[in-house]
């Protein structure tokens, strides 16, 4: 029976059919705990994200699970909000429970956090940040390039000149990378970035409401708002709608990530496709290869393509 279940040794078609019929009749299921005693693995993986309410992170988890379940691994999804001791506490618990691998979709991890994971023998994939020799593999989207292309579209295709930026928490990625793309595109076009056109809030709908209110209060308000994610952009739309500002007639708005809600709000958001589900799949594939092949080779980096999605808001 074990050879049929594991698939690791050849079994005749007749024998396989008989064993599978018995398995089905008895409702047999392999005990992962027993298998773990032999393989020294728990066949569980951790995914750590900053905000479970963000649909982007839900898509990320779905993509990861599509791959891991096919390999008989269970994915445990944990939230580690920005600020406070959440991330170290979550990582300690995951390591203590002997996860075979961790996908870290939460920015702001210190080298101490990363060393906690890799020092325990747990495989690590980071969703963003630079590729380095020690702290695991990296799967990321082209954040700088994506925002650069979006702002180029606003300038070259739509003719906007006074473009404001609403970011998440200052100093927390991917806001900084997206701000760099915004800044690079404006510099390329010879446009200034006055201090009153940049606001840092949070990666939430409320953050967008607050950020848009601040930018509208500028001495010379912007003619376009570039937001660091779609939730911020939807919040900014709320504020402009409440104040009777026409979008995009008076002020254009763009988001980033292309979550499902971006196409459902009115006007539908122009944004950047950040392929959350494929990011999750790619991270899981790397972990599966590392674990199944016992691969301890050099750290690898996967960079996924982006695309500007033009809709009604800009």
Image: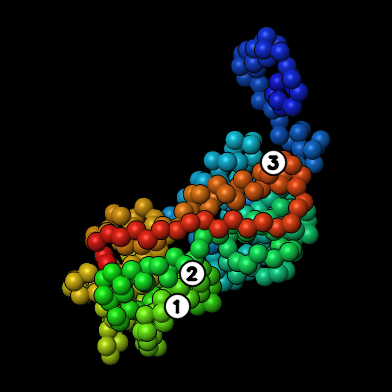
SS for callout 3: loop
Image point (45%, 77%), residue name: 184
Furthest-bottom residue in view?
219
SS for callout 1: helix
**Label 2, label 3: how many angstroms apart (C-alpha)?**
35 Å
Q: Quick one: label 3, few (<14), some, or many (20+) residues within 10 Å?
A: many
CB atoms at circles 3 and 1 under 8 Å apart? no
CB atoms at circles 1 and 2 under 8 Å apart? yes
Image point (33%, 68%), residue name: 153
Q: Quick one: label 2, few (<14), some, or many (20+) residues within 10 Å?
A: many
Q: Position of residue 201 (x, y in %)?
A: 43, 76
Name the residue nearer the viewer: 148 or 223. Answer: 148
Q: Nearer the viewer, mark 2 or mark 3?
A: 2
**Quarter of the image containing the N terminus?**
top right
Residue 43 numbered tag: 3
Residue 184 numbered tag: 1
Relative horizontal placement of residue 252, taking residue 104 as reference (left or right): left
């Amino acid at each position: 029976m074990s050879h049929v279940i594991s698939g690791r040794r050849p079994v005749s078609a007749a024998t396989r059919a008989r064993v599978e019929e018995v398995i089905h009749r008895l409702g047999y299921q392999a005990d992962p705990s027993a298998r773990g005693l032999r393989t020294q693995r728990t066949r569980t993986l951790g995914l750590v994200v900053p905000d479970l309410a963000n649909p982007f992170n839900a898509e990320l988890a779905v993509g990861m699970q599509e791959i891991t379940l096919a390999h008989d691994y269970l994915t445990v999804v944990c939230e580690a909000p920005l600020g406070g001791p959440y991330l170290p506490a979550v990582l300690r618990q995951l390591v203590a429970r002997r996860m075979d691998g961790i996908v870290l979709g939460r920015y702001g991890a210190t080298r101490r956090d990363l060393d906690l994971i890799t020092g325990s023998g747990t495989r690590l994939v980071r969703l963003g940040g630079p590729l380095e020799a020690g702290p695991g593999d990296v799967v990321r989207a082209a954040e700088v390039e994506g925002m650069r292309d979006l702002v180029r579209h606003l300038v070259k295709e739509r003719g906007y000149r006074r473009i404001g930026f609403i970011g998440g928490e200052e100093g927390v990625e991917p806001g900084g990378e997206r701000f760099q793309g915004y800044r690079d595109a404006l510099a390329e076009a010879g446009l200034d970035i006055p201090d009153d056109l940049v606001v840092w809030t949070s990666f939430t709908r409320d953050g967008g409401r607050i950020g848009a209110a601040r930018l509208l209060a500028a001495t010379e308000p912007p003619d376009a708002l570039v937001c660091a994610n779609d939730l911020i952009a939807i919040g900014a739309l709320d504020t402009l709608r409440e104040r009777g500002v026409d979008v995009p007639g008076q002020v254009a708005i763009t988001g980033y990530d292309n979550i499902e809600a971006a196409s459902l709000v009115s006007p539908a958001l122009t944004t950047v496709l950040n392929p959350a589900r494929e990011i999750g799949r790619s991270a899981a594939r790397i972990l599966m290869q590392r674990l199944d092949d016992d691969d301890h080779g050099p750290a690898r980096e996967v960079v996924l393509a982006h695309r500007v999605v033009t809709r009604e808001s800009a």
